[in-house]
Image: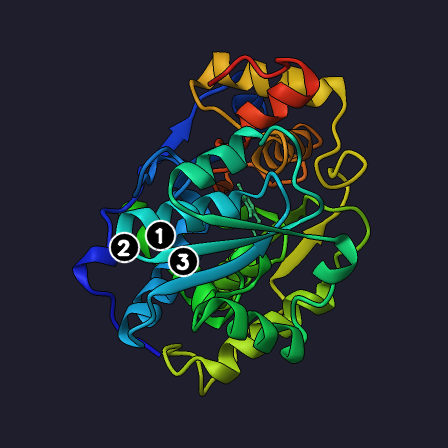
Amino acid sequence: MPSTLSSSFRHAPSPLVALESPTLQRAGVRLLVKRDELLSMGPGRALCGNKWRKLQYNLQAARDEGQETLLTFGGAYSNHIAAVAAAGAEFGFQAIGIIRGERPEGLNPTLRFAESCGMQLQFISRQAYREKENPEFLSRLRKQSGPFYLLPEGGTNALAIHGCRHIVEEVERQAEALPGYWCCSLGTGGTFAGIVDALNGRAKAIGFSALKGVFHEEEVRLLLKRSLGSSSLSPLAEAPPKRGAWSINTDFHFGGYAKFEPHLIDFINGFHRQHGIALDPIYTGKLFYGLFQLIEERHFPKGSTILAVHTGGLQGIEGFNERFGKLIEVK
Ligand SMILES: *Cc1c(COP(=O)(O)O)cnc(C)c1O
């Protein structure tokens, strides 16, 4: 495992900004946004946000191992697929994306972008896709494609979690004091696990699930344990962090992954007009919608400072609008 990043895989800290709004004033809270969507490393705007943070140490590991090819898995609109494609182009790796489902006649904007970065797309049936962690399936892939550095679907592994710890480390240098509440969107939970790990019980973390029902706190617990177990990088390896100070909110998934309702779209468009910050409809839109609702319900004590992580995902807006009819005004 690489212990430090070479300069190619480093970046300047993303901006930390304070939002102003009557809702925040009435509730007497401060809201800071860690704008990881503005980290833009490669072509397009796909290699940003948490997908970049999750890739940093993996790209370093791939290079250290002398690997020339990155291989990963994802759905047709996946932010992770787009990010790996951009990383391949930016850092000189071949990239293979195994995509769930039939090849459509016309590629959507995410897959068009991935191909334009030189990613080789292989479409497999949903049934075959379920084998993606099966060692036999992977060894067949290796026979077909030659050696590769494997990135799991969604990009979450111990190195990815380690990369997400930097979100906390950067904010600690940028903010006057450690914010009391840390909010982020949750898919596989890898980003959240990195934040919880780095906070080590010093502040409360709230994960807002973008998925319906399937997300269990147990999965985050497993990720935390695995990240400690396999990461010699973690300074916490000998003293497991306090785990009590985090929770998962499942009230704002809007029916499930990539599902939405008109008031979510209105919120996203209104948020952009008011704050000049674009949100995606899959993850960050739901996070901020839920967070503002909790703030309005006075969930946070007066005087609290809340930090929300903008994890990116804006590459998905084009495909979303193409599918559902230009709902989101922002680009
Ligand atoms: C992938 C993604 C997430 C989910 O991250 P996990 O680490 O899988 O929980 C959140 N926000 C955005 C914008 C994403 O692309």
Q: CA distance from mark 1 to mark 3?
A: 11 Å
The kind of residue on which mark 2 rests is Gly
Specify which label sits upstream in the sequence, 1 or 3.
3
Q: CA distance from mark 3 to mark 2?
A: 14 Å
List x then y, in percent, for residue 225. 58, 78
Q: Label 3's element?
A: helix
Residue 3 seen in render: no
List x then y, in percent, for residue 254. 77, 33
At horizontal 74% and vertical 28% (from top left) the residue drawn is: 260
Q: Which residue is mark 2?
A: 92
Q: Is residue 43 above or below residue 320?
A: below
Q: Nearer the viewer, residue 311 or 65?
A: 65
Q: Which residue is mark 1?
A: 88
At horizontal 60% and vertical 38% (from top left) the residue drawn is: 77
Mark 3, mark 2: which one is toward the viewer? 2
State if disc 2 and disc 1 touch (CB < 8 Å).
yes
Circle number at residue 55: 3
Q: Label 2's element?
A: loop
Q: Is residue 28 above or below residue 166?
A: above
Q: Nearer the viewer, residue 104 or 52?
A: 104
